Amino acid sequence: MPITPANGQTAGDATVSTPAGAAEPIMLELVDEDGTTIGTAEKLAAHQPPGQLHRAFSVFLFDEKGRLLLQRRALTKYHSPGVWSNTCCGHPYPGETPFAAAARRTAEELGIAPALLAEAGTVRYNHPDPASGLVEQEYNHLFVGLVRAEPAPDPDEIGEIAFVTPQELAERHERAPFSAWFMTVLDAARPAVRELTGRSAGW
């Protein structure tokens, strides 16, 4: 059974600190199948089986060579620790736009502001995570963009980063664990990725 972190230090955990230092649960937006907000739920509760459909986002950033920036999630994260995934992903706070949330979490996790960040559609999926027992029932807003600054990953969020070509990604995917949602969001974002990086990048 996953344990909710008690320190309440980051929005990547299931709690967040208030100015008075007390930990408050992070709330997510629950949505219907059309992506319309219908309520809120505490973050960890929304991921307990069978899962509650909620709003999320996924970011794919590329360098000037058309390589995708991957991150390996920190081993201390309660959900999907130590696995590789896309540049950044997470959940908007209730009332926060997905675009604002994507930019916020990219800065918090990687210490960078994308040189370009553009909407790339949405995808809805249901992915159980066998390792944690949690379930991703998400209506996910996709974003693609460019990164020109050197990332400065937060070690509480990210264990490692890598820029990869499509071939390097395929090789890494064969030998290393990836997040349950990774291929679903990447495949959904591919048309926008190809438009951004050009045919020669191979995406």
Image (spheres, rainbow, N blue to C red):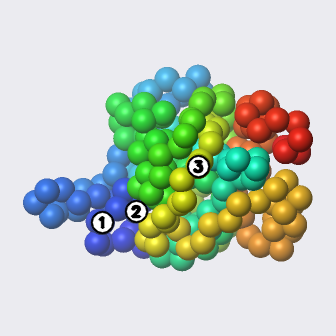
* Residue carrying label 1: 9
Quick one: which residue is furthest to the bottom in this view? 75
* Residue carrying label 2: 13
Find numbered disc 2 in the image and state the secondary structure of the residue it sits on: loop
Q: Quadrant of residue 135?
A: bottom right
Residue 155 percent location from the top left of the image: 46, 72
Residue 162 percent location from the top left of the image: 68, 65
Q: Quadrant of residue 193?
A: top right
Q: Amino acid at mark 2?
A: Asp
Q: Is residue 175 left or right of residue 148?
A: right
Vertical position of residue 149 compared to residue 152: above or below: above
Q: Is residue 22 left or right of residue 186?
A: left
Q: CA distance from mark 2 to mark 1?
A: 8 Å
Find numbered disc 3 in the image and state the secondary structure of the residue it sits on: loop
Q: Quadrant of residue 95?
A: top left
Dot 2 crowding, Cα within 10 Å, few <14, some 14–19, many 20+: many
Residue, x 44% and y 57% (percent of image)? 111
* Residue carrying label 3: 148
Can see residue 29? no
Q: CA distance from mark 3 to mark 2?
A: 28 Å
